[in-house]
Image (cartoon, rainbow, N blue to C red):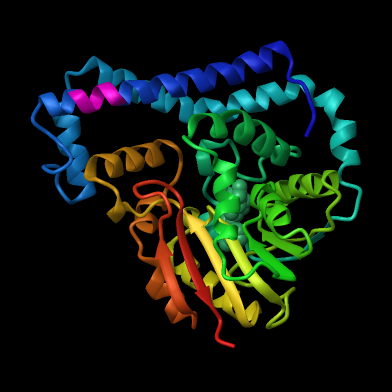
């Protein structure tokens, strides 16, 4: 989406990115300080709370550790606020475009549904007010937080990972594709790129995020069919109505029982022979103990209350319990995101 931030908003966002990059550099020094204190990946305790306690104690007098903690807290809390302020500066100029992009072939249908408490009562990512906090929160999340902050601070091509999980599938001719957890449309865009001839549907409880996905769809000339609702209960879709069900980065934002319910519902809406592929954060068990501690620490700052419980889950048994066969959970980049779970509904 083409737009220019004003000078103040641009510098606010740039500052957040440099603060977060500085925090990462301090992290490298912390690991050296830990090694100097005789603590390394192999000797850290298995239990995560205990691991935090050992590291907190060992580094209690370390100014680098304190500075890293302070910067981590600052970035977690401030990046969303910086994005809101940057948006307010351009809001009057941008609103006509944002409204115009709601018009087009991409449809958005609002259904009555019971929002799960884990979604409605938690302000993920330390946002003020959660996913639906404000009228243009979808734009703020998709274009400012994501493209001007998140994509700059995570290593590698985070959008390329979305295409990667789709290119690794057994077929290249899925005609009807459903995405669960569409949000502001980043994975949806990857689906449209990899499967240009498919009809694409999406579901997400956040109206504001889907409004942004609708803008992205219309801007790209797509006819996506978007629905406000939840992946655990999708009465708007008949049994067997999709050839592929996919999701990117949703599991770590829900309790394990919601993941099981989403697998069961994905199975129902898939046609016999259809595929499911979903991706989420790296499995804790695949990481060395120091890296797992760092991910856990960052998740705690970052307003991710379900990360620890879901990142350690092996999703294969849950997918099999829903009925999927040929189930495979794997990480294409060892020790890094994403973790991919694949399964097929028997023909
Ligand atoms: C991290 S975002 C997903 C990102 C997006 N898929 C992408 O590729 O950028 C998580 C999304 O999951 C949605 N979500 C949370 N619980 C859900 C549920 N039960 N069913 C469907 N979507 C859900 C949230 O509203 C949010 O938009």
Q: Give the range drawn in magenta.
A: 28-32
Q: Quarter of the image for the N terminus: give it.
A: top right
Is residue 344 within the magenta segment? no
Q: Which residue lies furthest to the top in this view?
A: 7
Apparent side of residue 297 relative to residue 271 in the rendered image (left or right) = left
The correct choice, above or below, for 2 with respect to 237 in the image is: above
The quarter of the picture where residue 149 lies is: top right
Residue 63 placement (x, y as % from top left) = 24, 15
The image position of residue 167, as x and y in percent, is 59, 58
- Report the quarter where the C terminus lies: bottom right
**In the visual, does 191 lie left or right of 157?**
right
Q: Is residue 62 visible?
A: yes
Residue at screen point 47% across, 26% down: 75
Residue furthest to the left: 38
- The part of the image, by quadrant, that contains residue 21 is top left
All told, the count of numbered labels is 0
- 190 or 136, which is in the foreground? 190
Seen at 77% across and 21% down, the residue is 4
Up-down relation of residue 21 to residue 275 (above or below): above
């Amino acid at each position: 989406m083409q737009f220019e931030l004003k000078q103040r908003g641009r510098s606010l966002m740039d500052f957040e990115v440099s603060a977060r990059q500085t925090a990462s550099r301090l992290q490298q020094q912390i690991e050296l300080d830990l090694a100097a204190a005789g603590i390394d990946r192999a000797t850290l305790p298995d239990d995560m709370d205990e691991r935090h306690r050992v590291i907190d104690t060992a580094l209690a007098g370390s100014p680098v550790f304190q500075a890293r903690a302070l910067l981590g807290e600052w970035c977690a809390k401030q990046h969303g606020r910086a994005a809101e302020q940057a948006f307010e500066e351009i809001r009057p100029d941008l609103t006509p475009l944002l409204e115009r992009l709601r018009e087009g072939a991409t449809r958005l249908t609002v259904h009555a549904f019971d929002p799960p408490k884990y979604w409605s009562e938690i302000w993920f990512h330390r946002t003020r007010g959660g996913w639906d906090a404000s009228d243009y929160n979808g734009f703020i999340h998709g274009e400012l937080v994501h493209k001007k902050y998140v994509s700059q601070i995570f290593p590698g091509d985070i959008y390329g990972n979305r295409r990667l999980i789709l290119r690794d599938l057994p077929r290249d001719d899925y005609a009807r594709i459903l995405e669960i957890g569409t949000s502001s449309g980043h994975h949806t865009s990857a689906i449209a790129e990899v499967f240009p001839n498919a009809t694409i549907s999406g579901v997400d409880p956040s109206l504001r995020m889907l409004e942004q996905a609708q803008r992205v769809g219309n801007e790209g000339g797509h006819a996506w069919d978007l629905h406000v609702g939840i992946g655990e209960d999708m009465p708007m879709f008949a049994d067997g109505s999709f050839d592929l069900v996919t999701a990117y980065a949703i599991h770590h934002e829900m309790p394990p029982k919601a993941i099981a319910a989403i697998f069961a519902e994905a199975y129902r809406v898939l046609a016999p022979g259809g595929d499911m592929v979903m991706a989420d954060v790296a499995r804790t068990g695949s990481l060395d103990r120091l890296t797992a501690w760092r991910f856990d620490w960052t998740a705690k700052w970052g307003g991710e209350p379900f990360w620890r419980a879901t990142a350690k889950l092996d999703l294969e048994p849950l997918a099999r319990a829903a009925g999927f066969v040929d189930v495979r959970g794997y990480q294409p980049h060892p020790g890094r995101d994403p973790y991919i779970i694949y399964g097929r509904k028997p023909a």
